[in-house]
Amino acid sequence: MANSRRVSKVSSLIKREVSLMLMQDIKDDRVGAGMVSITEVEVSGDLQHAKIFVSIYGSAEARAETMEGLKASQGFVRRTLGQRIRLRRSPEVSFIEDRSLEEGDRMIHLINQLEIKDPEELEAQESEEMV
């Protein structure tokens, strides 16, 4: 129980610190190519690995370029986290693109496109098809 609380706390600290780094410290132009937001951080139970899920707004090219920039900055992010968060060992950091928001938008768009038919109209259509 205490371990899961600690993992959760470290996860939220990493999310906060990396968000600040994205806004202030990471100078790679590729990271600025798309709007980046951190959707989630998963930290392993031993605090040795951190998966940082990012949502990137922009074209496919901008998203790919931004991911390259984020992957290139992993060492910097790890070192900076080590300075800002008191842990025995800084976790290995990996950035993973999170497309769930985009998929959610697509699903909402598809649902909105569906026509909700009147039950009587549906019955008439079914009876025509049976003939």
Image (tube, grey):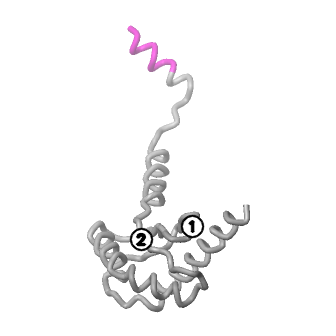
Disc assigned to residue 46: 1
Q: Name the residue located 48 percent from the left edge and 38 percent from the top edge.
A: 115
| 117 shown above or below 10 | above
Residue 120: % across, % down:
55, 22
Q: Quadrant of residue 68?
A: bottom left
- Please state the extent of the stretch shown in magenta in the rendering: 123-131
Image quadrant containing the N terminus: bottom right
Question: CB atoms at circles 1 and 2 under 8 Å apart?
Answer: no
Q: Is residue 124 located in the magenta-colored stretch of the structure? A: yes
Q: Secondary structure at mark 2?
A: strand
In this rendering, would 33 be left or right of 13? Answer: left
What separation in Å lies between label 1 and label 2 (alpha carbons)? 16 Å
Q: Amino acid at mark 1?
A: Asp
Q: Residue furthest top?
A: 131
Q: Amino acid at mark 2?
A: Ser
Residue 127: % across, % down:
45, 13
Q: Name the residue located 68 percent from the left edge and 65 percent from the top edge.
A: 3
Q: Is residue 35 located in the magenta-colored stretch of the structure? A: no
Disc assigned to residue 94: 2
Residue 79: % across, % down:
45, 86
Q: Residue furthest left?
A: 61
